[in-house]
Image (cartoon, helix red, strand yellow):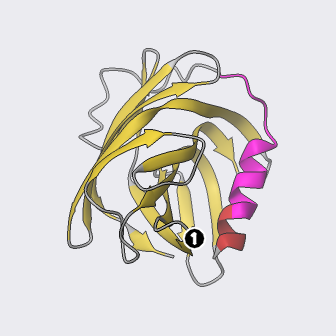
């Protein structure tokens, strides 16, 4: 499973680190509660999955969440993502080996419990063409709560180009 996420991340990190505006996404769009905002633009999030990478060796456990817009299709059998769209990637560390614990995950360098150690903001990325925009996250926090397989995720992130990305996702996450 780590291979699946690493392939996606390698592809995403190989694109330009500059950000472009998406004029098709504006405040007039009704995108509900699953979205993120970068600058004046809102981007819908329609699906997500969680990957469990296990024990970090220090009583914390590595879970990655990827939230995708509706332009992407995830094939869980072949572990492939196809399409073009927007996404948020969050690498979180919990104190619970089974799942992410409710709480606030703060950006940090070390993989301790309740840390966010890596994240990315993806805009208009085409998997096949390997084009689009990716912004690395250098700070911020994620607030997470869950009930069963339903997650309530709110994030406030700082990007490498000194912009803020805020957003939320409420719903189920598929397990990969």
Residue 17 magenta-highlighted = yes
* 46 on left or right of 149: right
Q: Circle 1 is placed at which residue position?
A: 57
Residue at 60%, 39% (x, y): give it.
Answer: 122
Instruction: Examine the rendered structure and indicate whether residue 159 appears above or below residue 129.
Output: above
Quadrant of residue 121 in the image?
top right
Percent x, y of residue 115:
46, 48
Comparing 106 with 68, the one in front is 106
Q: Is residue 88 visible?
A: no
* 2 on left or right of 33: right
Residue 107 magenta-highlighted = no
Percent x, y of residue 41:
44, 21
Q: Is residue 58 visible?
A: yes
Judged from this view, the residue extending furthest toward the left is: 147
* 82 on left or right of 59: right
Comparing 45 with 119, the one in front is 119
Residues in magenta, as a range:
6-19
Judged from this view, the residue extending furthest toward the front is: 58
Residue at 32%, 20% (x, y): give it.
Answer: 27
Residue at 25%, 57% (x, y): give it.
Answer: 102
Q: Secondary structure at mark 1?
A: loop
């Amino acid at each position: 499973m780590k291979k699946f996420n690493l392939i996606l991340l390698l592809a995403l990190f190989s694109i330009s680190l500059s950000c472009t505006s998406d004029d098709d996404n504006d405040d007039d769009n009704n995108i509900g509660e699953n979205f993120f905002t970068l600058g004046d633009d809102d981007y819908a999030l329609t699906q997500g999955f969680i990957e469990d990478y296990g024990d970090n060796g220090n009583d914390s456990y590595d879970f990655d969440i990827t939230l995708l817009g509706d332009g992407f299709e995830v094939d869980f059998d072949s572990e492939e993502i196809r399409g073009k769209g927007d996404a948020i990637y969050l690498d979180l560390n919990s104190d619970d080996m089974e799942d992410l614990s409710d709480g606030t995950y703060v950006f940090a360098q070390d993989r301790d419990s309740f840390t966010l150690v890596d994240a990315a903001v993806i805009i208009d990325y085409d998997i096949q063409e390997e084009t689009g925009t990716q912004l690395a996250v250098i700070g911020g926090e994620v607030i997470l709560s869950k009930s069963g397989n339903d997650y309530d995720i709110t994030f406030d992130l700082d990007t490498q180009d000194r912009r803020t990305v805020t957003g939320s996702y409420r719903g189920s996450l598929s397990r990969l």
